[in-house]
Amino acid sequence: MNTYLLDASVVVRYLLSSSEEVAKRLPLLLRGVKDSKFKLYSSFLLSLEVCNSLRFSLADKQKLETVLSKLFKLPIKYLKLTNAQLAEAASLSYDLGTTVYDTSYHILAKAHNAIFLTCDEDYYKKAKDLGDIELIG
């Protein structure tokens, strides 16, 4: 079974329909989860990051509530970082020149034998040699 870990950049683009590639790819993954072909994971911080991004992307509070209801229905299993994983993400973020947030998604993906899906081109360029990462959108 294929396993994927999504970061906030993918989910925000999906919720806002702001990327053609994400709009095509994510529904396929969501159907695959429903059919038990895929597993979707993310960090326990995903909802907070997505909410914050939506807060500054949407001018209308009612629209935010509508979009959040869609977020809460996504079949994503949320994962917490262990202390060792957090330390690894922090250390690796220094090596890559990235944020701990971005690196922590990648560390979680690797720990769960998942492919890290991101729309963050800057992070992807810095971390692609680590493997287990795919740039979409």
Image (spheres, rainbow, N blue to C red):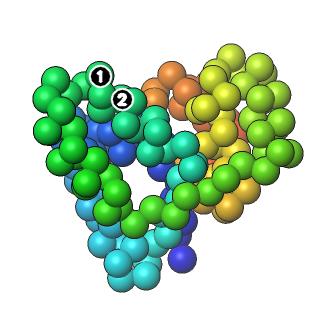
Residue that appears at 43% across and 82% down = 36
Residue 91 position within the rendered picture, expressed as x and y whole percent measured from the top left? 82, 28
Residue to which mark 2 is pinned: 53
Verify CB contact (< 8 Å) between mark 2 and mark 1: yes
* Residue type for callout 2: Ser
102 up-or-down from 23: above or below: above
Residue 136 appears in the figure:
no
When asked about the image quadrant of residue 129, the answer is top right
Q: Is residue 12 above or below residue 44?
A: above
- Mark 2 lies on a secondary structure that is helix
Report, in whole angstroms, how far the alpha carbon at label 2 lies from the one at label 1. Answer: 5 Å
Q: Residue at x 21, y 38 (%)?
A: 64
Residue at image coords 31%, 63%: 73
60 displayed left or right of 89: left
- Amino acid type, label 1: Phe
Query: Would residue 23 appear left or right of 44 to someone viewing this image?
Result: left
Secondary structure category for the residue under label 1: helix
